Image: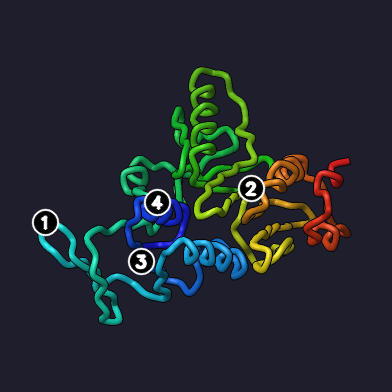
Amino acid sequence: VGGGFVSFEMCEMLRLANIDVTLILRENIFWHVLLDDTSGRIIEDALIRGGVTIVREAEVQEFTGGDTVTGAVLKNGDTLECDMAIVGIGIVMNLDWVKKARVAVRRGICANEYLETNAADVWVAGDIAEYKDVILGENLQLGNWVNAQMQGRCAGKGMTGKREPFRLVSFYTTQGFGTTIAFVGDVCMAPDRVILARGSRERAAYARIIVWNGRIIGASLINRTQDLAPLSRLIEKGVVVAGDEEKIKDPAFNLASLLN
């Protein structure tokens, strides 16, 4: 149940074990909360080729069974028989106890670029950290292990008096069903951000590059891992790409040339 990294990876592991898999999505496209239609459809194509049955625009009302699960009842009344249920539908931050301590929170625990909260001698790191990103110039909250690991290192240094800003172009990659998915930077869309589409569903290779104020701030990559390194450097260096949009959309264009 659910569309995201967890469900994608679990679907492949189950299919490698020759287990029949039905994937239930609340949206009409895989991972629609973060991806555009083309990205989602390419992933769906890979899942279907791998033998996964996709049920779209559906929600689970309840699971049936006693000691073991026997089925999933959908809100539309349909029942899907099953002997295993795996749910990956996101997370909700447990912030009540933090609020009581008068630590500032929004969606996560608020922090500055040093991962310091508003409370003295209290730092934050990992998925719950909503911090000031010195590279992108915005507040971010990211959920991946690379980001958490490096934030823990930065916060730990701060605790020992070696105060330095957290600086990282965050990224995450996964692969399955012959398809590689990668995120780099901030992949969330907003009305003032522009998408540059690089590639196509027909070629099953596609990059959705996000530009804000003339600079690349993030990208989602499907079967285009060759773009990951140059995009990371373009984000880190804050290279202005205004005027180069059509070049960037060309899948054959060398993104690294923009660094010169």
Q: Secondary structure at mark 4?
A: helix
Instruction: Tally the marks.
Output: 4
Residue at figure coordinates x 46%, y 61% from the top left: 50
Amino acid type, mark 1:
Asp
> In the displayed structure, does residue 90 sit left or right of residue 71?
right
Q: Nearer the viewer, mark 4 or mark 1?
A: 4
Q: Secondary structure at mark 3?
A: strand
Q: Is residue 181 visible?
A: yes
Q: Is residue 191 visible?
A: no
Q: Dividing the image into 4 quarters, which one contains the N terminus?
A: bottom left
Q: Earlier in the sequence, mark 1 or mark 3?
A: 3
Residue at figure coordinates x 74%, y 52% from the top left: 216
Q: CA distance from mark 2 to mark 1?
A: 43 Å
Amino acid type, mark 2:
Gly
In the picture of the structure, the residue carrying the numbered disc 2 is 185
In the picture of the structure, the residue carrying the numbered disc 4 is 16
